[in-house]
Image: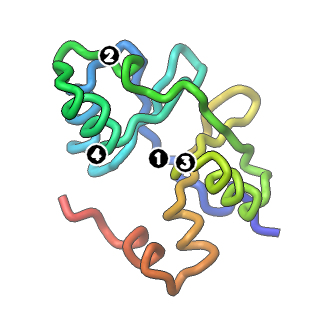
Amino acid sequence: MTTVGDFMTTRLVTMDGNATVAAAAQEMRDSAIGDVVVTRGDDVVGIITDRDITVRSVAADLDPNTTPLDQITSKDVITVSQYDDAVAAADLMRTYAVRRLPVIEDGRLIGLVSMGDLAVEREPQSVLADISADDPNT
């Protein structure tokens, strides 16, 4: 059985929910990533993506310099353990229509698994796997 821990990403960027949308966008740009895990203390409260910034902030005409991440972050976070089966994680993504799942162990964030990670692991010849494995074009 292939587990989530076999291929999850451990290089994470987290930000407090009080951080601004602009700060998250700058962090994504500087780190060449497309998402930031939103936290409140040690608790994961959401994931903000570049798409969320576009659709929930810019398109809604919210000021990115004053809008906190909490205002545009989805609140229902589905998480997995590093010991969970990779196929089960893919099923969760499909069921809840999410592309990323925080990996939690003993109440702490230890990783993130994405649809791209699953594609690279499960279907290495797929177009999504090819795109996901490639370096970002920043």
Residue reaching furthest bottom?
125
Residue at left offset 37%, top offset 25%: 72
Q: Earlier in the sequence, mark 1 or mark 4?
A: 1
Q: Which amino acid type is marked by label 3?
A: Val
Kindly report which numbered mark, 3 or 4, lies closer to the viewer in this rendering.
3
Q: Which residue is mark 3?
A: 98
Residue drawn where x is 50% and y is 22% of the image: 39
Indicate which label's residue lies in the foreground, 1 or 3: 3
Q: Residue shown at 53%/53% (left/top)? A: 9
Mark closest to the chain's N terminus, 3 or 2: 2
Residue 114 horizontal/vertical position (percent): 53, 55
Dot placed on the residue nearer the N-terminal end, 3 or 4 = 4
Q: Which residue is mark 2?
A: 68
Mark carried by residue 11: 1
State the CA–CA distance, disc 1 to disc 2: 23 Å
Image x and y of residue 5, in percent: 69, 55
